[in-house]
Amino acid sequence: MPSTATELAVSTRGLRKTYRTRRGRQVAVAGLDLDVPVGGVHGFLGPNGSGKTTSIRMLLGLIRADAGTMRLFDREVPEHLPEVVGRVGAIVESPKFFPAFTGRKNLSLLAEAIGAPSTKVDEVLDESGLGHRGKDRYKGYSLGMKQRLAIAATLLKSPDLLIFDEPTNGLDPAGIREIRNTMRSLGSQGRTVLVSSHILGEVEQVADTVSIIGHGRLLASGRVSDVIGAGSAGGVRVGVSDPRAAIQVLTAAGLSARPDGRLIAVDGVTDGAEVTRRLAHHDLWVNELVPVRADLESVFLQLTADDTLEADARAQVEEVAR
Amino acid sequence: MIRLVRVELQRLFSRRLTLFTSLGLLVITAVVIFGTAHDAKPLSGQELTMAQQSFEQAQKDWKLHGAEMVKECRKAEATERETDPTVNFGCDMQAPTWANWGKPAVELQRALPDTLQIGSYALAFVAFLLGAGFLAAEFSTGSMGNWLTFEPRRLRVYGSKLLAAGLGVLAPAVVVLALLVGSVWIICDAWGSTAMPKGWGPPLLMALRVLALTAVAAVAGAALGSLVRHTAAAIGLAMAYLVLVEGMFVNSFLQPQQPWLLLKNVEAWVAKGTTFFLDECRVDQAGNYMCAGVERNVSFGHGTAYLAVACGLIVLLGAILFRRRDVA
Ligand SMILES: Nc1ncnc2c1ncn2[C@@H]1O[C@H](COP(=O)(O)OP(=O)(O)OP(=O)(O)O)[C@@H](O)[C@H]1O
Ligand SMILES: [Mg+2]
């Protein structure tokens, strides 16, 4: 867990939320510890139903947490939410505005509510590329335009933290790229962007740091490269004329090597040079070397698979206990 | 807070529902005025001739048989009084006067309160509808969640919306009241008398009470809208209550409970007190089952307190839930 010494935009401890449903209680967030450092883009990754939206709603004071603490810019929320809300812009799930009003009207009502100057409305409309369509009714907007309006609305506050919940849902590739660029540029301006997603590629492309959750709990977090490294340490695959001898040499050197088809898989090394040097020492010449780069996908699947098994096991234990 | 109320007022007046209901209100106003005019219209020439003829006939009859009729009546009464001394046949008959024939001319003094009373129901109902839709629509479109990410202080949000609903309906209500008063005056000026022996004070105060009622109805509607979170549900609830409780049950088992029902108290507030009839039935000594209508009062103070408490309760309940409930 990262220490609280670095400044955090978002920090939660033991966050819990249980919904009451017809079938009984549904644990949506089960003791989440989430830390989002200030500055840059932070991915909030988890499969469908893992509790991302629920966590975000709790942070914004829209729903009540059952237990745990939350901080935004080091202020306890929801108690001190009014003090920090001006620094936080958020889109939760899909954009939601008054359908019968124009985009511009929707924004100007929000601007007036927070005391932003009315010039700001045109500014953010232009900034989000909505421009002249601002005079159309919101219900006539395409999904992409709605999303842009929502982003424009968050910018009314000039926020330090932007929370986007699955912002690319339903967008075409061009729209996705545009949002990605927006997030990157916001992140590089020194603002903090917290973007939730269940699409790994999206987070991998845009995020500096990432938190992965499953079943409402944190599974891994840190720099994207570190999380990839930790999840499945990576490695190389090498081809030599005498694999058996090569495995002996590498194992003797304390590396984990195993046959993998006609190649040898060496886990846990990121530097291929180390492998080639050791093998060359014993006159085993490498004719092929492929770095194995674990992507977020495999890390994610591995982490969430473990989690599912663990959860199943726990469920069984509870069953037996009863 | 003032800023929030201003924004909410802007939103209220930008809504199409506000526009439509205001137009609807104008139609209702026109119907009320038409009704007043219909009641006030003097008899046509032909009707007048007929009334005159009937009056002359009655005068003739009285001259011929009047004295005899009174005598007969007294005799019959005296006979009956031998068994029941309280009997009264009402034999003090008078010669017919023209005032009892034809149609009495309309008087502003009476027509104005009647019209304001009818107008008050229309205004209160429309205000309730506007208020309910104003809050409920925000929940059903999901924009409440977005709004709360801009202003998370829930009680302020709730308060500003209720206040805006209450203040916002005053504008159309003033227009409607002015139209009502103006047209009743014109009607009475044309066909009757505009004399106001007691002055304009009482009807103006009554109009102010109608305005207050309208604002309260809007606030209560808004609070209910925030509780049920769906315009149709809020209106459905209100209609079901009005039709079932105030329309049907009130004539049967809820008859004695009228002082605790809404409409009587609205009436008591607007008209500074009102009455209602109660069937009192009993079995008398002779074993006959007898019913008699008894008039009962609902005082102005009772109506005022009732409306204040009812509105206060729903606003309070709405506030508690608005503060606590999850917003999706
Ligand atoms: N209003 C609600 N009532 C009951 N259960 C709910 C409610 N909202 C969410 N849940 C449940 O809580 C769990 C977490 O839901 P949540 O929406 O937070 O997931 P998510 O990570 O945002 O998923 P997705 O990627 O699909 O958006 C799910 O099991 C969901 O069924
Ligand atoms: Mg979600």
Image (cartoon, rainbow, N blue to C red):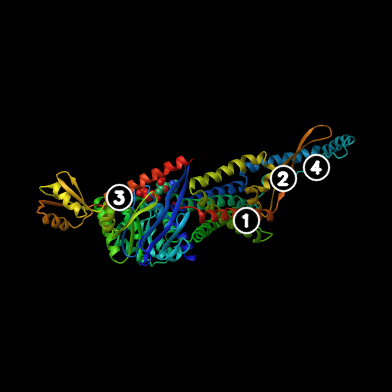
Disc nearest the viewer among 1 and 2 = 1
Report how far apart the C-alphas of labels 3 and 4 lie in the structure: 104 Å
Query: Which residue extends farthest top?
Result: B287
Query: Type of residue at label 2?
Result: Asn
1 or 4: mark nearer the eye: 1
| Left or right position of B57 against A140 | right
Say which element carries label 4: loop
Mark-to-mark CA distance, 1 and 4: 50 Å
Do discs 3 and 2 belong to a common subunit?
A: no
Q: Earlier in the sequence, mark 1 or mark 4?
A: 4
Q: CA distance from mark 4 to mark 2?
A: 13 Å
In this view of the protein, can residue A140 be seen by the observer? yes
Disc 3 residue type (three-letter): Phe
Q: Which residue is mark 4?
A: B93
Q: Nearer the viewer, residue B228 or B34?
A: B228
- Locate residue B89, reporting x and y percent: 82, 39
Pointer 3 residue: A300
Same-chain status of marks 1 and 2: yes
- Both labels 1 and 4 in a single chain: yes
Residue underneath mark 1: B308
Mark 1: secondary structure: helix
Q: Which amino acid lies under the numbered mark 4 shown in the image of this protein?
A: Met
Q: Earlier in the sequence, mark 4 or mark 2?
A: 4
Q: Nearer the viewer, residue B35 or A7?
A: A7
Residue assigned mark 2 = B100
Q: Nearer the N terminus, badge 1 or badge 2? A: 2
The answer to whether one can see residue B182 in this image is no
Q: Is mark 1 within 8 Å of ligand 1?
A: no
